[in-house]
C-alpha cells in the first residue's frame, strides 16, 4: 500500500492528505499546531473562482515610490524589508511583465478552474456545507471613471473565461447591502465565487473527514527531514516519523524545511492582518475596497477586515498601521461597529516570485513532493492542488497539465 507523510495541516496539507486518501493512500499529517490554525485560519474566506490570473506586482513608476512613502494601503513595506526580499522581488517584477504574466496566468487559470468542484466534493465528504455561501463577492469603487473602466475590463475577462458578473450602480449596491453607508460609484459583483463563514473551521472539517476515514494527524514540530534507504524521515521532539513518500505543505515555512536539504527557494512574504468588528447591520457578501486593498467579509466572529500585503519576514513583530488605515477607510463606507478583539491576527501569504504554486516531485530527491506557494488564493486552491499532487503521486494524469507547477523550475 502507498504511504505518505504530509508536513503541514493548513488547507493545502489537509487537502493533499484527503486527496491521497481518495486514491487509497495511507497518510499521516504532522503539524505543530491544530489543523487550519495559521494562514488558512485568518484569510478573507473567499473561494475565488474569478481569480483567473495571479496577483501581479504593479510595475508603474509611482508604485514603488507610493509603497516607500507609505502612501499606499494595499501594499506596505519598509526599506530594510525591501532590501532583504530584493532578490525575490526583482524576480516577481520580471514575472509580472505582461508577456510573462499572460503565460503564467494560463497555468493558474487551469488550476483555479477546477477549484470549486474539488471543494464541493470535500465539503460534501466533511459535512461542511453550512459554512459555505454561494453568493459571489464584490469589488467596490468610489471613482465613477475608474469603475467604468474596471467594469469594461471585467466584462471582457468574464466573456473570455466563462465567468459571470453583475455591474451594480450605487442604488443597486445600497439596496443589496443596507450595511453600506456610502455606496460610492458602485460595485462589480462576481457571481461565481463562494465564501466561507469560518475559513479555519473549513480546514478543521476537512481534517476531521480525513481522520474519520483512517488518516492520522500528529501534533509535533518537524525539526529536520532526511532521506533514508526506504524513503523519508521527519524528525520531531518525541520521535522520528518515516514513510516511503514525503509531502512538504508547510505554507510560508516550506522554504525553511527545504533549506535543511540545501534547497533554496525564494519567497515573497506578504503578510496580512485581520480584526473582527461588531457590525450592527451585517454585510451579506464579502467586498474588496479597491481603493484601499482590504476585504470586508462577514464571518461567524462578526465582520472581518483583512488587509492587503505587508512585505515582512515571518519573525518580525506585527505593525498594525495597515490595519488601522483599512479600518479608517472601512468606517467611511460601512457601519463596522466596534472592534471585537484587542489583539488583531496576523499571518503570511506564501507567494513565489512567479506567482504559481509549486506542485510535484523533486527532480533531485525522489519521493520528496511539494505543494506550497499558493499566495493570495491558497484557500481557493487547496483541494484542487491537493488532487493535482495526489494524481501525480499515484502516477495518474492530473486534471491540468503538470509542467508549469513542477519544482524543476526552481532547480530541485
Ligand atoms: C489576509 C489574508 C487574506 C487571504 N484571503 C484569501 C481568500 O479570500 N481566498 C483565498 O483563496 N486565499 C486567501 N488567502 C491566502 C490563503 O490563506 C493561503 O494561501 C493559504 O491559507 C495557505 O495555506 P497553506 O496550507 O499553504 O499554509 P498554512 O495554512 O499556513 O499551513 C501551513 C501549516 O504548516 C505548519 N508548519 C509549518 N512548519 C512546520 C513544522 N516545521 N512542523 C510542523 N508543522 C509546520 C503550520 O503550523 C501550518 O499549520 C489570504 C491570506 C491572507 C494572509
Image (cartoon, grey):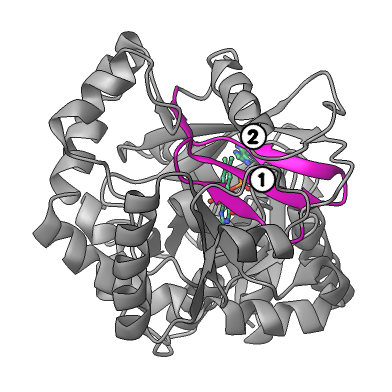
**For the residue labelled by badge 2, is the local secondary structure a helix, a strand or a loop?**
helix
Q: Of helix, strand and loop, which one carries label 1?
A: strand
Going by the image, does 221 lie left or right of 298?
Answer: left
Name the foreground residue: 162 vs 213: 162
Which residue is located at x 26 percent, y 51 percent?
354
- Please give the residue where the numbered disc 2 appears in the rendered image: 330
Mark 2 or 1: in front is: 2
Which comes before the other along the chain, label 2 or label 1?
1
In the rendered view, does 27 fall on the left or right side of 393?
Answer: right
Q: Position of residue 251 (x, y in %)?
A: 53, 46
Tell me: 221 left or right of 365.
Answer: right
x 42%, y 75%: residue: 111
In this view of the protein, which residue sits in the foreground, 140 or 363? 140
Callouts 2 and 1 close, C-beta under 8 Å: yes
**Residue 296: assigned label:** 1
194 vs 391: above or below? above
Instruction: Identify whether 394 is placed above or below 356.
Output: below
Residue at point 42% right, 87% down? 399
Give the magenta range: 284-312
Q: Is residue 78 visible?
A: yes
Tell me the number on the disc at residue 249: none
339 versus 230 height, above or below: above
Does the magenta portion include 297? Answer: yes
Residue 245 x/y as whole percent: 53, 65
Q: Quick check: 5 left or right of 216?
A: left
Residue at image x 33%, y 64%?
Answer: 53
Q: What separation in Å lies between label 2 and label 1 (alpha carbons)?
A: 8 Å
Amino acid at each position: 500500500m502507498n504511504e505518505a507523510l504530509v508536513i503541514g495541516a493548513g488547507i493545502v496539507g489537509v487537502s493533499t492528505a484527503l486527496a491521497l486518501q481518495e486514491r487509497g493512500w495511507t497518510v499521516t499529517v504532522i503539524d505543530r499546531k491544530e489543523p487550519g490554525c495559521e494562514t488558512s485560519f485568518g484569510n478573507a474566506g473567499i473561494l475565488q473562482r474569478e481569480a483567473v490570473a495571479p496577483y501581479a506586482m504593479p510595475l508603474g513608476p509611482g508604485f514603488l515610490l507610493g509603497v516607500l512613502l507609505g502612501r499606499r494601503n494595499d501594499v506596505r513595506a519598509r526599506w530594510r524589508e525591501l532590501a532583504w526580499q530584493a532578490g525575490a522581488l526583482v524576480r516577481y517584477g520580471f514575472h509580472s511583465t505582461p508577456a510573462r504574466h499572460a503565460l503564467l496566468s494560463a497555468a493558474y487559470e487551469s488550476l483555479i478552474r477546477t477549484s470549486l468542484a474539488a471543494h464541493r466534493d470535500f465539503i460534501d465528504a466533511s459535512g461542511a456545507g453550512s459554512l459555505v455561501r454561494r453568493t459571489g463577492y464584490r469589488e467596490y469603487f468610489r471613482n465613477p471613471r475608474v469603475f467604468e473602466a474596471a467594469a469594461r475590463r471585467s466584462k471582457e475577462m468574464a466573456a473570455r473565461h466563462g465567468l459571470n458578473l453583475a455591474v451594480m450602480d450605487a442604488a443597486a449596491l445600497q439596496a443589496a447591502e443596507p450595511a453600506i453607508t456610502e455606496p460610492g460609484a458602485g460595485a462589480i459583483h462576481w457571481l461565481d465565487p463562494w465564501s466561507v463563514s469560518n475559513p479555519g473551521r473549513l480546514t478543521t472539517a476537512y481534517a476531521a473527514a480525513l481522520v474519520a476515514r483512517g488518516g492520522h494527524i500528529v501534533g509535533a514540530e518537524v525539526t529536520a527531514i532526511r532521506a533514508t534507504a526506504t524513503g523519508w524521515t521527519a524528525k520531531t521532539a518525541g520521535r522520528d516519523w518515516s514513510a516511503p513518500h514525503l509531502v512538504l505543505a508547510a505554507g510560508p515555512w516550506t522554504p525553511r524545511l527545504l533549506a535543511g536539504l540545501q534547497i533554496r527557494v525564494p519567497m515573497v512574504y506578504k503578510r496580512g492582518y485581520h480584526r473582527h468588528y461588531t457590525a450592527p447591520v451585517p454585510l451579506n457578501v464579502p467586498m474588496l475596497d479597491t481603493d484601499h486593498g482590504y476585504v470586508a467579509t462577514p464571518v461567524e466572529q462578526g465582520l472581518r477586515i483583512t488587509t492587503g500585503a505587508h512585505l515582512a519576514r515571518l519573525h518580525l513583530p506585527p505593525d498594525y498601521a495597515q490595519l488601522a488605515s483599512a479600518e479608517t477607510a472601512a468606517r467611511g463606507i460601512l457601519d463596522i461597529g466596534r472592534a471585537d478583539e484587542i489583539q488583531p491576527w496576523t499571518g503570511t501569504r506564501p507567494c513565489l516570485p512567479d506567482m504559481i504554486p509549486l506542485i510535484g516531485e523533486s527532480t533531485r530527491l525522489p519521493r520528496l513532493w511539494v505543494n506550497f506557494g499558493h499566495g493570495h488564493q491558497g484557500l481557493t486552491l487547496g483541494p484542487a492542488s491537493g488532487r493535482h499532487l495526489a494524481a501525480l503521486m499515484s502516477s495518474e494524469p492530473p486534471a491540468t497539465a503538470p509542467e508549469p507547477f513542477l519544482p524543476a523550475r526552481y532547480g530541485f
